[in-house]
Amino acid sequence: MTDISLSPHGAAAAKAQSNSIFRHARYVVAENPVTGAAFGLFILIALCALIGPYVVPYDPLASDTSATLASPSFKHWFGTDQLGRDIFSRVIVATRLDFTIAISSVMLVFAMGGFAGIAAGFFGGWTDRIVGRISDTIMAFPLFVLAMGIVAALGNTVTNIVLATAIVNFPLYVRVARAEANVRRDAGFVQAARLSGNGDFRILLMHILPNIMPIMMVQISLTMGYAILNAAGLSFIGLGVRPPTPEWGIMVAEGAGNIISGEWWIALFPGAALMIAVFCFNLLGDGLRDLVDPQRRT
Amino acid sequence: MAKKKPTKTEELLRNSDKSLPLLDVQDLTVEFVTRRGIVRAVQHINISVAKGESLAIVGESGSGKSVTSYAVMRILDRAGRITDGTVMFSGIDLRAMPENEIRDLRGREMSMIFQSPRLALNPIRKIGRQIEDVLHQHAQVDSGLVSEKAIEMLEHVRIARPRERYHAYPFELSGGMCQRVVIALALACKPQLLIADEPTTGLDVTTQKAVMDLTVDLTRERGMSMILITHDLGLAAAYCDRIVVMEKGHVVETAQAERIFKAPSHRYTRKLMRATPRPGVTLRDLLPEEEAKSARPIGHTDRHAAKPLLVVEKLVKEYPRNDARGTLTKLFGPRPAVEPENFRAVDGISFTVDRGESVGLVGESGCGKSTTSMMVMRLIDKTAGTIMFDGEDIGEIPARKFATLPLRKRIQMVFQDPTDSLNPRFTAARAIADPILRLGNGERAFVRERCEELARQVGLPVELLDRFPHQLSGGQKARVGIARAIALKPDLIVLDEPTAALDVSVQAVVLNLLQDLKDSLGMSYLFVSHDLNVVRLLCDRVIVMQTGQIVEQGPTDQVLVAPQAAYTRDLLTAIPHPPL
Amino acid sequence: MLTLISRRMMLVIPNLIGVVIITFLLTRALPGDPAAYFAGPAADKQAIEQIRVKLGLDKPLIVQFGRYVADLGHLNLGNSLTTGQPVLTEIKNRLPASAELTLFGLILSMSIAVPLGILAAVKQGSWIDHTCRVVATAGVSLPVFFTGLLLVYVFYFLLGWSPAPLGRLDVFFSPPPQITGFYLVDSLLNRDLSTFRAALSQLLLPGLTLCIFSLAPITRMTRASMLAVLASDFVRTASASGLDSRTVILTYAFRNAMLPVVTTLGMVFSFLLGANVLVEKVFAWPGIGSYAVEALIASDFAPVQGFVLAMAILYVLLNLIIDVLYGIIDPRVRLET
């Protein structure tokens, strides 16, 4: 930005603004302590993803025939599976893979869908029609079914899971970004920017994008949960991740057969981890939305 | 449904003392629980309305006038509650009444009409049915006759072809028509009190007159009392017997309508009175007495020496008709009746703006005045005609390209909504600096100094420059918008209803500021407005537009005093005239 | 009304074209050799070549597309490698099982979610409201296959209330004579109460799983739109004219609030049809979802393609119904011709 020379109090103003955001954040957390808890949980999950593999008590792939199907105990907190692998270690180590899949697919779709949506909303006309047609066509499929089809066709790999998750999320991002850009297209401040000599590209970058960013952040947080569920669902039906790689969805699938014979822990712990992670992202999304837009509280 | 037996409250109402005021509000206090703690919206106010009397509650935004009416009807939202005082209706204590009994009073004994009539009706229910709902509720008519009664009500509010309109949905009616339906709804059960909350805000001035005349006629006819809540002192004085002036939750003055205008006693009333634009005054008269004295006299444009800065000839803008049908339907669907493909928003208009001149462009909504100003601004492209600016045909330059040309500097704009026209993420200084940074030459190093200079010029305290729009008041935001528009010393400024979103007292100050800036900087103004009283004050010449065409143009004194076109006369008579 | 339906039908056409193109691209624009995909993992080189010629994969892409469309026109979706049956027949046979499950789950969830959402909005801040918020956030966080397994564990293993999660009907019962293909309906039509009960007991858990899954979005949307409508001007007018709260909430607020909910149903169906696949796998439900999953594991591509296509067409038709429903509620859509 060019306003370094603009304001002797620039730093002070920026500080005042960040102060006020901070204060507002504190207010939101105080009003809704659940958001604070969700944030703490998020840190914990991120920590598991970062250092999990180095701190777990067992090798997640090492089988131990002497301790198969052991129920949770002091030695194996979450018990062991059919091959005697330690479920606690596997659940923790899996965090990284699930997290990576979710983040990379969300980043990918944020880049594609966000860009396409803003362009469609801002320029209208043909850009809008083409982007609209693409996302309509994707939306014509039940999303999970399309993801299945894509992974089946492109090949059974983790990369394709990421790609498929990104593609099925594309219309959601386009819709949000398009709507937000569209209402701002004729806003007074955009016209004023045009009168001040800003070209289209500059207006998009300096005036529209910063105003849409907060809403897109909420969208990211909300779809992170969906991305994790989607990826886990695909691996549950045997797509993408292959055994013995530890991943929550596939671990639940491995334990599914044991449920009816009462060995609940094999499926429960990875399933619970999955649920907590998604829950955490959804709560964070709601909290972020409160932060960004107090009127749209739910 | 058979007629109900009269309830206890009904008996009470019948037998009440005829000498009592119909509505008597004593010591009313209303509080709202907000994020920032408890806010007292209304504090210890006293208001009374006699039978058959019409009373106006006048105040600027935040004065508590609407809250008062909601409190009387007991329809405050969840955050608000009455904490003190009594509300007596025909001798009955409304505050103490249980919810199911007061519900019975609403609509039958006292009813209410709101602003934005289109939103006040259920969008997916036939209007006739909505009137029936109220009749049914209060068991006013036998169910066999209820639709006849609803049609009769539509006739009463002068809706043509009521039998057909009974089946219409709100979206099929104009704003003025919707307001008539709302009035029919409110009067259906012959209440004794009608509360009208800004009933004409957002309606055109001619529609406003029709709606107000109708309301007053109907209430007089039925011997009803009325409370009119408005920000417009002129409207209040023209239609009501007595006026209550509110400021920040307090009643500051209550008096007969004429008295308020002739001898306002409270300081605030005087200020409000003075600030209301009306015939026979100058811009300076709008300011509070102290300031008016110290203000410089208004400069006069030497029109003879002036040569045209802007020449617009046969300007046309067409839009394709809004057609929801897709291509496929167009190919296979039934052929529609032949109608022109395009809709002419602006239909061949010609006018000039001289150097240093201020020209008013007036008309009702949809007349094409905003489209015209957008074309002159080069924000949208014309369909036909020429726009000559200082000898150059700028109409030929596509709007997209115009943004970065040096010419851009010379035509700037002040927008209608000061909030919407400022980027929420830019500080005031950054907003003012934007045109300088993009189009200014050699001034980059001194941007801050220039911003401060501009702030002083528009009367914005320099320390506010580092604030964000949400930290500024409406008037301050308007000043930022003006500072941004004059930053590049333009020759022409288009003012698009620059004061429409402001309270009258702020409007008075901003209008004076605009006049001073024009005098000191020698700019020309194209002033787009629907308010003839404001145009009268600021403009040398007036152009009146209707349905895309110019019906009349000429010097302000001539057009507004001795109008030639019938439409101009209609507009002028529709302005509420206070009894002076 | 007829014009509305025909107009919506027109809008369906581009969507169907898009669906056909995408399913075609999914099979032909593969990085590997599509012939090898269709031939399956066990095929040798010669078999792959045979498939290639048989499917016309040696021809230019546009010719292949023409052939693909022609095949679709003849309702030919190819044959399954594992069962040798035409894909279309198998999908047709299995569709009622999936449809019965999905509809059961949806109806169950609507009948809980809509009243819950309305109550939460009307009594904002009450315990119902808080329950509603918890349901809404927790519900979307539950992986549907996990919910299913938990229910099986609790109701089958621990409590023993529910039969083994193995298909639509216990082995001791024979399916009712096919009329609609829905066991619940058919058994009732046949006045066979014991079969009805058996079918219901099998359907209850998977149905409940889908219900829990779709509860959250519907509750959330109902509550939000009801809140918005309750705060709107016309509801204020209605209460200022003294209408009783029943009329205000049901006649004025509810019908308007249903509009966004009906729109959300489209999205809910999208999720539901996807979740259906996972639930069918958990409960060994013989629907088209588990058919597709079995085919996926066997790398049998034709059924997968057929499944994706069938689901998409089904979904497009469901959206059509939703649009028409919307038009019935909202005169603005109905009359805008």
Image (tube, coloured by chain):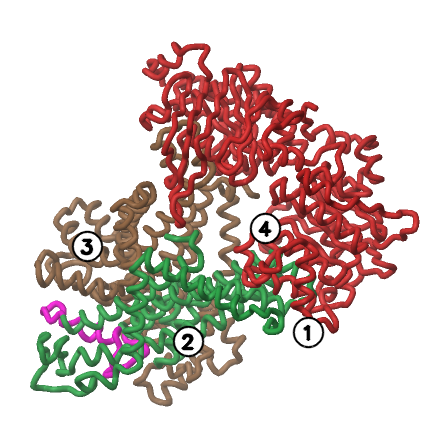
Chain colours: A green, B red, C brown
Give the mark count: 4
Tag 2: Cα neighbours inside 10 Å, few (<14), some, or many (≥20)?
many
Question: Distance from label 2 to label 4 (Cα)?
Answer: 35 Å
Question: Distance from label 1 to label 3 (Cα)?
Answer: 74 Å
Q: Are marks 1 and 3 on the same chain?
A: no
Chain of the residue displaying label 1: B
Tag of residue A163: 2
Question: Distance from label 4 to label 3 (Cα)?
Answer: 45 Å
Decide: marks 4, 1 in contact (CB < 8 A)?
no
The nearer-to-camera label among 2 and 4 is: 2
Chain of the residue displaying label 2: A
Question: Distance from label 4 to label 1 (Cα)?
Answer: 54 Å
Residue C127 visible, this orientation: yes
For the magenta stretch, what is the residue range? A238-264
Q: Are marks 4 and 3 on the same chain?
A: no
Q: Are marks 4 and 1 on the same chain?
A: yes
Q: Which structural element holds mark 1?
A: helix
To which quarter of the image does residue A236 belong?
Answer: bottom left
Q: Which residue shows up at 12% across the image and 49% down it?
A: C194
The nearer-to-camera label among 3 and 2 is: 2
Of the residues shown, which amino acid type is indicated by label 3?
Answer: Leu
The residue beneath circle 3 is C204
Q: Are marks 2 and 1 on the same chain?
A: no
Q: Which structural element holds mark 2?
A: helix
The residue beneath circle 1 is B445
Tag of residue B325: 4
The nearer-to-camera label among 2 and 1 is: 1
To which quarter of the image does residue B409 belong?
Answer: bottom right
Q: Which residue shows up at 46% across the image and 29% down it?
A: B45
Q: Are marks 2 and 4 on the same chain?
A: no
Q: Which residue shows up at 46% across the image and 26% down it?
A: B46
